[in-house]
């Protein structure tokens, strides 16, 4: 006789919370798509990244996760992309040799990390281009940056992501899906017009196949 199948059931409180999170993020994503389609700052930031000789990406806390994602996407087709991780590549390493052709992409979401602010400001003051990706116009880096992408959605302005749904002190003021969307748009636009990007990407694909990196 077969043993009875046991089906676990999530607590009702978890199901209710999940429904609220999905509803909040759906509204925010729809508003984010509308904003991204009409805001020219994304194209301006991508052009600045494409035109640079060296590209550094900075973030702290959750911002570092997004910084790593952006750098990974840019690295597929662009040369000279470096994540400032504070260990292998320290802020001191880049601040001691800033050039006018350099760009620093700082991902600084509320709550703003002092580490990001304190290291991005000297970069701009040294003559490098500073691109800021943020979710608030009150970000202290905005007055000093070359380009600013301020993620702004109708859902954000009306406060659909309630405080009681933010389960981490650094939960962005906008949906993580919208932040990821912005990163993907900037990376794709940056590499689409970069000289040699197609050749570099094709060569990476060839080498990846030869080295057996993927298990398709």
Image (cartoon, helix red, strand yellow):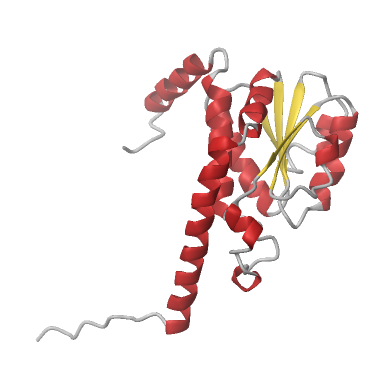
Kindly identify the residue that appears in the image at 62 percent across and 48 percent down: 65
Percent coordinates x, y for residue 137 in the rendering: 76, 47
- In which quadrant of the rendered view does residue 57 lie? top right
Which quarter of the rendered picture does the N terminus lie within? bottom left
Q: How many numbered marks, from 0 up?
A: 0
Kindly identify the residue that appears in the image at 82 percent across and 49 percent down: 115
Percent coordinates x, y for residue 177 in the rendering: 53, 51
Which quarter of the rendered picture does the C terminus lie within? top left
Residue 19 seen in the current view: yes
- In which quadrant of the rendered view does residue 187 lie? top right
160 vs 190: above or below: below
Q: In front: 2, or 169?
A: 169
Percent coordinates x, y for residue 208 in the rendering: 42, 27
Residue 80 seen in the current view: no
Q: In front: 213, or 198?
A: 198
Left or right side of 145 for 77: left
Percent coordinates x, y for residue 130 in the rendering: 78, 32
214 vs 192: above or below: below
Question: Which residue lies most toward the left here?
Answer: 1
Left or right side of 193 for 116: right
120 vs 47: above or below: below
């Amino acid at each position: 006789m077969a043993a009875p199948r046991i089906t676990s059931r999530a607590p009702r409180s978890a199901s209710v919370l999940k429904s609220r999170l999905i509803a909040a993020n759906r509204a925010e994503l729809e508003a984010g798509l509308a904003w991204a389609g009409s805001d020219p700052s994304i194209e301006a930031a991508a052009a600045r990244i494409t035109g640079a000789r060296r590209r550094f990406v900075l973030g702290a806390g959750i911002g570092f996760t997004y910084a790593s994602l952006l750098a990974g996407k840019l690295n597929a087709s662009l040369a000279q992309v470096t994540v400032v991780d504070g260990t292998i590549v320290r802020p001191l390493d880049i601040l001691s040799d800033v050039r006018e052709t350099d760009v620093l992409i700082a991902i600084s979401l509320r709550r703003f990390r002092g580490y990001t602010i304190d290291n991005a400001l000297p970069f701009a003051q040294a003559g490098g281009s500073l691109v800021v990706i943020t979710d608030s116009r009150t970000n202290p880096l905005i007055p000093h940056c070359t380009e600013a992408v301020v993620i702004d959605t109708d859902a954000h302005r009306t406060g659909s992501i309630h405080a009681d749904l933010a389960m981490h002190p650094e939960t962005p003021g906008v949906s993580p899906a919208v932040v990821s969307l912005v990163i993907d748009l900037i990376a794709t636009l940056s590499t689409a017009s970069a000289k040699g990007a197609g050749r570099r990407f094709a060569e990476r694909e060839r080498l990846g196949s030869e080295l057996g990196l993927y298990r398709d």
